[in-house]
Image (cartoon, rainbow, N blue to C red):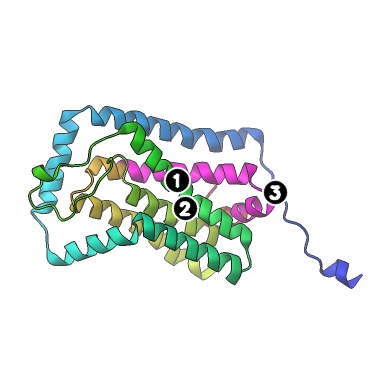
Amino acid sequence: MTATANRRPAPQRPPSTPHATARAIVLPLCVILLLVLAGLAITASPAVTAADLAAIRALESARTPLVDAIALTDSVVFSPVAAFVIVALVSAVAWFGRRSPGSAVAFAALALLPWFGSTLVKDIVRRPRPLSADLPHHVLTDTGFSFPSGHTSFAVALGLALLIVFGRGRLRRPLLVFAILAPLLTAFSRVYLGVHNPSDVLASLVYATAAVLLVLALLRRFAPAPIAATVAVRASRTGGG
C-alpha cells in the first residue's frame, strides 16, 4: 500500500484540440515558407543588396577596438562548435542534475532543430555573403551562404529554448533578458563583422522564432508524454505555446 501510494503518476499528454494543433503547426510553417520566398526575391534584387552594403559600410566607419572584441567574442560563443557544446552541457545538467530527461530532450530539440533548419533555408536561397572586396575594413571573413544567419538563428533558438523549458521562478527574468539581448547582439555582430547583410539577420530573427514555435507545437503533439507534458508546463508558465 505504501509503495503504491508513493508511486508517481505517469505524465499525461496535455489536452489539445485538432484545430488548435493544426493552427500551431501551420502558421509558423507558413511564415518560414514566406521567408524562403522573400530570401529568393532579396537574392535577385540588386537594390536590396546595395542597401545592405551601404548599411555594413556605415557600421564599419564606426568601428572601435572594444566593439570589435565584443563582436568577435559573440561570433565564437554562437559558432557551430560552441552551439553543440552549450546544448550538450545544458541538456546534461537537466538530465543528470535535475533528473529530468524530458526537459533535456525538449531543450535540445528546441535549440538545435531550428538551427539545423536555417542551414536548409540557406541551401535553398543560396544568397552570397557580402564580398570582402566591397568591405575593405571588414573584421572577419566567413564562408557559405548568407540568408539567413546561422549564428543569429541559434541565438534566437537557444534563448527561447531556455525560456520555454527552464524559465520559471527566479530563472524566468534573467532568461527572458537573455532571450532578447543575445539574438539582438548576435544580429548586430554578424553585420558589424561584415559576414552577413542586415536583411539576413532580420530574416533570421523572424525565421528562428517561427521555427521554435513549430518545433514546440510538434513536440506537444507528437513527442512522448514525458517530453510533451514538460514542454507544455513550461510554455504555459512562460506565456509560450
Residue at which label 3 appears: 13
Q: Is residue 47 left or right of residue 23?
A: left
Could you tell me how far apart the alpha carbons at marks 1 and 2 are, in whole angstroms?
7 Å
**Which of the two residues, 180 or 1, is positioned nearer the viewer here?**
1
Q: Which residue is mark 2?
A: 111
User: In the image, is residue 115 above or below residue 37?
Assistant: below
Q: Which residue is mark 1?
A: 114
| Residue 52 lies in quadrant | top left
Is residue 186 found left or right of 193 in the rendered image?
right
Q: Secondary structure at mark 3?
A: loop
Specify the amino acid type for callout 1: Pro
Query: Alpha carbon of mark 2 to alpha carbon of mark 3: how far?
Result: 22 Å
Q: Few, some or many C-alpha atoms within 10 Å of disc 3 (few <14, some 14-19, many ≥20)?
A: some
Mark 2 or 3, nearer chain start: 3
Q: Earlier in the sequence, mark 1 or mark 3?
A: 3
**Are circles 1 and 2 on residues that touch, CB within 8 Å?**
yes
Please tell me which residue is depicted at 37% across the width and 48% down the height of the picture.
153
Q: Are marks 1 and 3 in contact (CB under 8 Å)?
A: no
Kind of residue at badge 2:
Ala
Marks 1/3: CA distance? 23 Å
Quarter-of-image position of residue 22: top right
Give yes or no for residue 216 being in the magenta stretch. Answer: yes
Q: Residues within 10 Å of mark 2 (few under 14, many from 20)?
A: many
x then y, percent, for residue 222: 64, 42
Mark on residue 58?
Answer: none
Image point (23%, 61%), residue name:
72
What's drawn in magenta, residue-wise? 203-232
